[in-house]
Amino acid sequence: MLSFAEENYLKTIYHLSTTDKEDVSTNAIAETLHTKPASVTDMIRKLSNKGMINYRKYHGVSISDEGKKVALTVVRKHRLWEVFLVDKLKFNWDEVHDVAEQLEHIKSPLLIKRLDEFLNYPKYDPHGDPIPDENGEFQIKPKVPLSALDLNASGIIVAVNDSNSLFLQYLDKIGAYLGAKIKVLDKIEFDNSLEIMIDNKRTVFISKEVSENILITE
Amino acid sequence: MLSFAEENYLKTIYHLSTTDKEDVSTNAIAETLHTKPASVTDMIRKLSNKGMINYRKYHGVSISDEGKKVALTVVRKHRLWEVFLVDKLKFNWDEVHDVAEQLEHIKSPLLIKRLDEFLNYPKYDPHGDPIPDENGEFQIKPKVPLSALDLNASGIIVAVNDSNSLFLQYLDKIGAYLGAKIKVLDKIEFDNSLEIMIDNKRTVFISKEVSENILITE
DNA sequence: AAATTTATTTAGATTAAACTAAAAAAATCG
DNA sequence: CGATTTTTTTAGTTTAATCTAAATAAATTT
Ligand SMILES: [Mn+2]
Ligand SMILES: [Mn+2]
Ligand SMILES: [Mn+2]
Ligand SMILES: [Mn+2]
């Protein structure tokens, strides 16, 4: 049985190895977990001894099959709980992450099985991220950052890259949400900001940074 | 913010001080928490420094107002989660305690508020124990152990004294549940066992021990 | 290819929560 | 009451997870 800390390390290593490169550096882990590189070295030695990761001194770590299984279970739990909070307890999508960070460590296979059933086997969480099934399988929707759309092209918001509260609250404010239709009205060369139309009714200007964190299906 | 361990100590001290005497002994705490008296001494010094309990060396501890507030919040969370598991996730009443022991430590006032609302403000958990409200208030139903009923007297099961799985599974087996009607058909002098009728249809013999752990309202 | 910078590991400490063994206080009993 | 037993505390360790400072390896830059 793994500790909360161990589970969090595995989740981080898994995420970094899929979003960045397969081999994850000590510093990258330290940065995501807001901890010091020396602490990371201690923990990766432990996880390596438990067979959860592959570790070569000074050369970073990669996740093992066993470690990936654990990481995907934690991710599954995190996202199922987020769905529960939004769908059943009326949380807003910007309020769920921190609570899910706690709930994801509850150990009870029956609980997760029943929760999944209760939620009617959701495939995506409130931020558009896919929920792995019991076997760790999940489908990634084809999606591109809004910043990559051509002028006058349109699409549907399917996910966000950043689940930070401030970003999500900003999206609420401009009327953007998962499922909203977006059309690119103008691309401002000067700062790469965009003028977009949301749901055929509202026109707003958004910064390059925002457009890179909104994911669209065309 | 208190750790899981601190919360568990406070819950235990609170329970012991209401079921047993107001002043709780080091040994009693150690026994309930399956830990050693020396560990308890360390922890009660810490909780005392935090103002959660009143401690006089060699004379046991009593819970402070602040400590009681914390303990009641933990109890409230534990019991609300048990209701959730049984009512929403179809857990049996003997399957919920261990999971609730984990869930009771999740820190999110909003979560508990919304959960309470979602469950429609339940007053009792699946074992008949009262759920404290946001202010720590709760009502205790008048209840007596089944062992105290007179011959031919009858009543309704309102709670159980022991939430141990094996006991609850035994109750399921004989058809006893919260709300069931019980009539005492015979009191066996030899071993203080009882012959009872459940819901006017089933007759069973139960031991003294069982009859002491079933709580009845007359 | 050497010098410098950056990344990583090691060494040594700290804190929380447990433990064992021994000492000390309180309670009980002859 | 004084001796014995029980309870509680103290002293000293252990393990997990963190930290700082120093040492070492790897990468980068002259
Ligand atoms: Mn999240
Ligand atoms: Mn999410
Ligand atoms: Mn319980
Ligand atoms: Mn209960």
Image (cartoon, coloured by chain):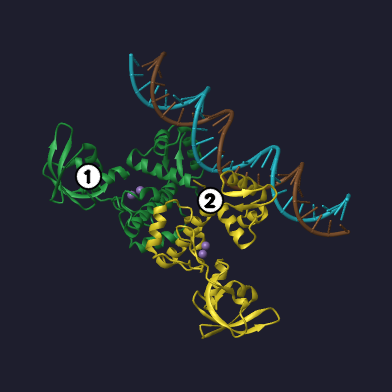
Chain colours: A yellow, B green, C cyan, D brown
For residue B218, say whether it is visible: no
Whether the residues at callouts 2 and 1 have beta carbons within 8 Å, the answer is no
- Pointer 2 and pointer 1 on the same chain: no
Residue A28: % across, % down: 65, 56
Pointer 2 indicates a residue of which chain? Answer: A
The amino acid type, in three-letter code, at marker 2 is Glu
Numbered disc 2: secondary structure: helix
Residue A163: % across, % down: 55, 66
The residue lying toward the viewer, choosing from D7 and C13, is: C13
Left of A72 or right of it: where is A213?
Answer: right
Pointer 1 indicates a residue of which chain? Answer: B
- For residue B144, the mark is 1
The residue lying toward the viewer, choosing from B73 and B51, is: B73
Residue C3: % across, % down: 87, 51
Q: Residues within 10 Å of mark 1 (few under 14, many from 20)?
A: some
Residue A47: % across, % down: 58, 47
Numbered disc 1: secondary structure: strand
Label 2: which residue? A66
